[in-house]
């Protein structure tokens, strides 16, 4: 292969990477110490209902096939999930979190800005989790928007959905069910709702997140997991 062919191949690869970054907020590192896939979850997680065009969204129909592709790719060695989300569709967010939790490849999450609502299960779904010192997690019960019929069956549905989320968070972090529930139902912090806002240091102390970190530390941790073949399920 001559130099022109190499240049064309590199240009094509750069173009494909730019397109992935533009359309899906993802990038695959090549030429670094290890080949890792970076997945960003930003704005509001969009599920079955299409959100307004002016909203920043992460679409679950984009994320799910990417996760399958990462798990099956022989070239990708690890997954970095960067989170800055206000939450969103509960079912879609929990589905994404379940997929990440069940991956065999090394996974690390990094919360920047915020990981609120259903962003909390996403943050704890990776095998190792980090949070920036200035970032926060907002823990609150499941909310529904629009018309809600106040009947026992509907309240029971909400309770069961919250139980699923609580069980997932407890299973994938170091917090106890009792403590997480008390954070959920805290009535003395949020003005118009129950729940708790946790800064980075507090989130680590509570056992939700493994550690406070910065990007270089997060990547080095993922590299170490790759080198130690630390991809076992939690």
Image (tube, helix red, strand yellow):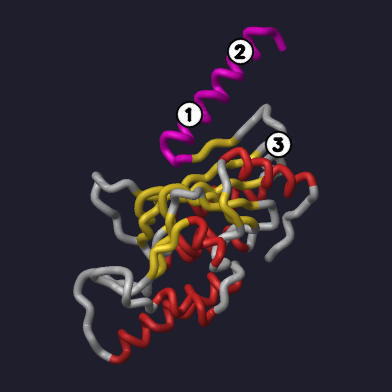
The secondary structure type at the circle numbered 2 is helix
Q: Residue furthest right?
A: 228
Kindly report which numbered mark, 3 or 1, lies closer to the viewer in this rendering.
Answer: 3
Q: Are marks 1 and 2 in contact (CB under 8 Å)?
A: no
Quick check: marks 3 and 2 in contact, CB under 8 Å? no
Q: What residue is pinned by disc 2?
A: 7
Within-10-Å neighbours for mark 2: few <14, some 14–19, many 20+? few
Front one among 142 and 221? 221
Residue 14 position, x and y percent, is: 54, 24
On the image, which quarter does residue 32 sit in? top right
Residue farthest toward the top in the current orientation of the protein: 3
Residue at x-position 48% and y-position 73%: 165
Q: Between disc 3 and disc 1, whose residue precedes? A: 1
Q: Position of residue 219 (x, y in %)?
A: 63, 41
The residue singled out by tag 3 in the image is 34
Based on the picture, tell me whether residue 139 belongs to the magenta stretch.
no
Query: What is the C-alpha distance between the residues marked 3 and 2?
Result: 23 Å
Task: Please state which of the two labelled residues, at mark 1 or mark 2, is closer to the viewer.
Answer: 1
Look at the numbered disc 3 and give the secondary structure of its residue.
Answer: loop
Image coordinates for residue 166, horizontal then vertical, percent: 49, 75
Residue at image mark 1: 18
Does label 1 or label 2 sit earlier along the sequence?
2
Q: Is residue 13 magenta?
A: yes
Q: Is residue 62 visible?
A: no
Quadrant where the C terminus sits is: bottom right
Residues in magenta, as a range: 1-25
Give the SS element for disc 1: helix
Q: Is residue 79 left or right of residue 61?
A: right
């Amino acid at each position: 292969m001559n130099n022109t062919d190499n240049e064309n191949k590199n240009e094509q690869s750069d173009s494909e990477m730019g397109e992935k970054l533009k359309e899906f907020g993802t990038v695959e590192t090549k030429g670094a110490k290890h080949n890792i896939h970076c997945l960003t979850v930003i704005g509001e997680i969009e599920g079955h209902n299409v959100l307004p065009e002016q909203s920043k969204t992460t679409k679950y129909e984009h994320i799910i096939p990417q996760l399958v592709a990462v798990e099956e790719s022989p070239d990708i060695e690890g997954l970095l999930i960067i989170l800055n989300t206000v939450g969103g569709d509960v079912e879609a967010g929990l589905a994404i979190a379940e997929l990440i939790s069940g991956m065999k490849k090394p996974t690390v999450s990094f919360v920047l800005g915020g990981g609120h609502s259903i962003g909390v299960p996403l943050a704890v779904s990776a095998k190792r989790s980090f949070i920036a010192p200035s970032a926060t997690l907002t823990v609150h019960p499941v909310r529904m928007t629009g018309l809600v019929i106040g009947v026992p069956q509907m309240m029971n549905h909400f309770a069961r959905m919250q139980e699923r989320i609580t069980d997932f968070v407890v299973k994938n972090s170091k917090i106890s069910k009792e403590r997480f529930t008390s954070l959920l139902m805290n009535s003395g912090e949020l003005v118009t709702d129950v729940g708790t806002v946790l800064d980075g240091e507090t989130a680590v102390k509570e056992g939700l997140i493994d550690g406070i970190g910065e990007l270089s530390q997060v990547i080095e941790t993922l590299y170490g997991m790759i080198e130690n073949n630390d991809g076992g399920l939690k």
